[in-house]
Amino acid sequence: MAARKVKPVSSLTEKEAAKELEQLAQAIAAHDQLYHQEDQPSISDAEYDGLRARNLEIETAFPDLVRPDSPSLRVGAAPSDKFEKIEHEVPMLSLGNAFSDEDVIDFCQRVRRFLGLGEEELAITAEPKIDGLSAALRYEKGQLVQAATRGDGRVGEDITANVRTIKDIPLTLKAKNVPDVIEVRGEVYMSHADFTRLNVRQAEAGKDPFANPRNAAAGSLRQLDSRITASRPLRFFAYAWGAASALPSETQFEVVASFKKWGFATNPLMARCTSVEELLEIYRAIEAQRATLGYDIDGVVYKVDRLDWQERLGFVSRSPRWAIAHKFPAEQASTILEGIDIQVGRTGSLTPVARLKPVTVGGVVVSNATLHNEEELARKDVRLGDTVVVQRAGDVIPQVVSVVLEKRPKGADPFVYPTVCPECGSHAVRELNEKTGKEDVVRRCTGGLICPAQSIERLKHFVSRNALDIEGLGNKQVEAFYKDGLVKSPADIFTLQARDEENLKKLKDREGWGATSVKNLFAAIDDKRTVDFDRLLFGLGIRHIGETTARVLARTYHDLDAFLTAMKTMTSPESEAYQDLIAIDGIGETVADALMGFFQEAHNIEAIEALKAAGLNPSPLEAQDTGSPVAGKTVVFTGSLEKMTRSEAKARAEGLGAKVSGSVSKKTDLLVAGPGAGSKLKKAEELGIETLTEDEWLELVEGA
Ligand code: IVH
C-alpha cells in the first residue's frame, strides 16, 4: 500500500477529507480481509491502529462525511482479539473413508464381526456428507448457551455470537422432551445460490470472491465481528450430538427425527437401511441428485442405527467404528505441466511438485499438485509440457493422476530426478530397506542438521497446530526467524524473549511486528512451556510418531524424564527398553526402530536437553479415565468370552484406560478368564495375579 500523505486534519479541505475517508475505508477493509480471512496481515497492529485513529479523527472533524461503509461503524471486536478456546466434553471425531462398494461391504462385515451378530438384522442410516464445517451447539434447559468449531477435535473455538446469527439454528428449543443438557452437532454450509449472490456482492464492493461455498462458509463463520457473519447467508444441518444429559430415543434415525421436531433443519435424504444393497442403492440415488441439490456434498455417511451398538463399537484412534463416509469419486480436469519443483520435507524426503497451468477442478483453481515421489513420477513418466490429468478430492492435496500421451509435445525428454538435495547440495539417496531388501520409494537428503530445508520444516512442524500450536508463530514467521538466525532449533524459541531483551535490534522494530504482537508472541510461547507431553512428542517430528502413537507413548511413560531414561537405554532390539516398547498395544517394530534410530543420534538428545534447559517442562497426560477402576491396569483376556467378542472386550478395556496385553507377566494386573482358559490362567495363578470371570469383569466395568 502506498504511503499516505499525512496532513494535519485541521488543514484538510472537505474534498480532501472525503477522498481520504474513502481511501481509509478501502484500506482498512483490505487489511481486515487479510487479517481475518487469510490470517496474513501485511501491516503491524500499530500501523493498523494508526489508520483507524486517523479515520476517526477526520470523521470527528467532518461528521457529515461519515461514509455508510465507514470502518468505525463496524467496530466489532478489536482486531487483535482472538476466539476463546473451548474444550469439547466429548471429542469431535472424524470419519473413516470408503471409496468402493467393497469398502462398504467390509465395513458392514467388520461391524457384524465386532458385535458378534449372527443372523440378526443390522440397521444402518445413510445421509449426504455435507461439505461445510462442523459445529457443536450446546443447549441448557432448551437455551442455546454455547457454540464451538471442531478445531482439532479436542479443543475448538467459541463462535457463540456468530452462530446466534444463523437463521437455521434455533435459539430456544421449545419441545417437551428436550433434555436438560444437549449438544447438537452438525454442519454449517452455504447453498450454491447464496454463494453466487455473495460473490456478486463481494465483487461490487471491490473485494475478492470466495473460491467455493465451503471457503465462503468458513470465512463467514470465523469472523470476529458477528455482524459480518449475520450478513452472510449461512445454513445448518443437524446430524449428530455430543454431551447429553439424556437422549430422546434409542436410534440414530429417531434422535435426528427429534432434532427436526425441536426446530432444526435435518437432511431430508437421510434413510434407514437394513442391507448393504440398500445402502449402495441410496448412495447411487444421492450421487445422481448431487448436481441439483443446491449445496455441496462429497459423499454419503453410513451410521449404525442402534445407539447401544454404537456405544459398544466405540472408536479407533480418531474415528468411530460405527460410522464411515462413502466418498464420491474425485473430480478431475486436464491441464499443462509447466514445471516440476522438488521440495524437501522435514525428514529429508524429496517430493516432486507439479507446477500447472491454473485449471478449475471441482470449483477450486489448482496450480500445484503433488507427484508423490520419484518412483511414482517415473512410473507415470511425466514430462515438461505434458497434458496431465489432475484430481482433487475433499481437503486432500490435488494430485497428478496420469499423462495424456497423445498430447505429448515432440522432443519432450524424461524428467531427470536430482540425486543431490536442491536445498543443501548433500547427496540424496534411496535407502535400502533391510527387512524387505527393497529400495525405499522416497529419495532422501542426507544433509540432516546442515540442511536448512529440513530444519525449517522441522521447526514448522514443532509449532504447528497439532504439536505446540504457538499462536503468532506460523510458517511465515518461522522462515523469517530462521533466515535471520534468530531461531535455528526448537529450544531457540524458548530463549527468544531473553535474547531479545539483551539485544539492541529488537523484534518489535522488525517489519510486520509491533510491540503488541511481540508481547503476544512471548506470552504464547511462555504458555507452551507446559505443553502436554504428547504434543511435544508429536512435535519432535520423529518418523512414524503420529499424534495417536505420541499419545500412546505419553500415556505409557507418563513424563519426559521417564521417557528419556528409557529411550537412552534402548541400544538394540534385544534391550529391555525395546522389548517393553513393542509390548505396548499399538506399538510395533516400525515405531520402536524409529525411536531407537532417533535416540541413538546424540544431537537429538541434545536438542531435547536444550529444550529442558530453556525452561520447557511438559505436562504429563491425564489418565484417560480416572473414574474407572481399571484405568492404568494391564489386563489379559483368555479363554472364550460369551457376552462380547475379543476385539470388543479389548476396545472397551482400552477405552477405560486399561492396557490390554496378549501374555501374562509380572506386570499383569488382571486376568479375565472365560471357559477353556489354560496355560495363561495357570501362569496367572502361579504369579498370584487377580483373575475374574467374564461376568465379574462386566460387573467391575459396569457403568464406567
Ligand atoms: S457424522 C463421529 N454426518 O464429516 C462422527 N459428519 O469426516 C461425527 N460431515 O467433521 C460426524 N456431513 O464435519 C457426520 N452427515 C454427516 C456429515 C458429517 C458432513 C463432516 C463433519 C465431520 C466430518 C468427518
Image: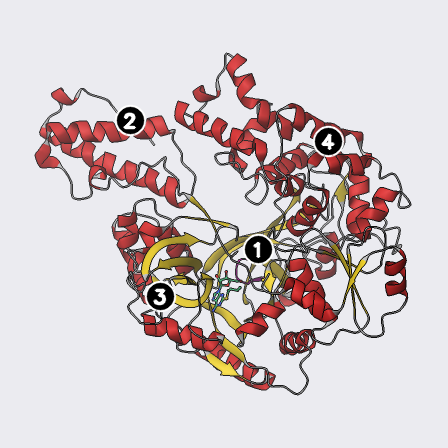
- Give the image's coloring scheme: secondary structure
| Residue 191: mark in rendering | 3
Local SS, label 3: loop
Give the residue number, with chain letter if any, for mark 1.
397
- Whole-percent x, y for residue 261 in the image: 33, 74
Q: Earlier in the sequence, mark 4 or mark 1?
A: 1
- Whole-percent x, y for residue 45 in the image: 36, 29
Quarter location, residue 199: bottom left
- Whole-percent x, y for residue 454 in the image: 68, 36
Q: Are marks 2 and 1 in contact (CB under 8 Å)?
A: no
Who's the residue at 71% across and 27% down the image?
A: 609
| Residue 50: mark in rendering | 2
**Tag 4: residue type?**
Leu
Quarter location, residue 44: top left
Instruction: Please name whichever residue, 519 or 284, is drawn nearer the observer in this view of the structure.
Output: 519
Is residue 341 highlighted in magenta? no
Q: Earlier in the sequence, mark 2 or mark 1?
A: 2
Residue at the left extreme, as displayed: 64
**Tag 3: residue type?**
Ser
- Can the viewer see residue 428 in this picture? no
Q: Residue 432 vs residue 424: left or right?
A: right
Local SS, label 4: helix
Q: CA distance from mark 4 to mark 1?
A: 28 Å
Q: Are marks 1 and 3 in contact (CB under 8 Å)?
A: no
Give the residue number, with chain letter if any, for mark 4.
449
- Mark 3, residues whose alpha carbon is within 10 Å: few (<14), some, or many (≥20)? some
Local SS, label 2: helix
> Disc 2 vs disc 1: which is toward the camera?
2
Q: CA distance from mark 2 to mark 4?
A: 43 Å
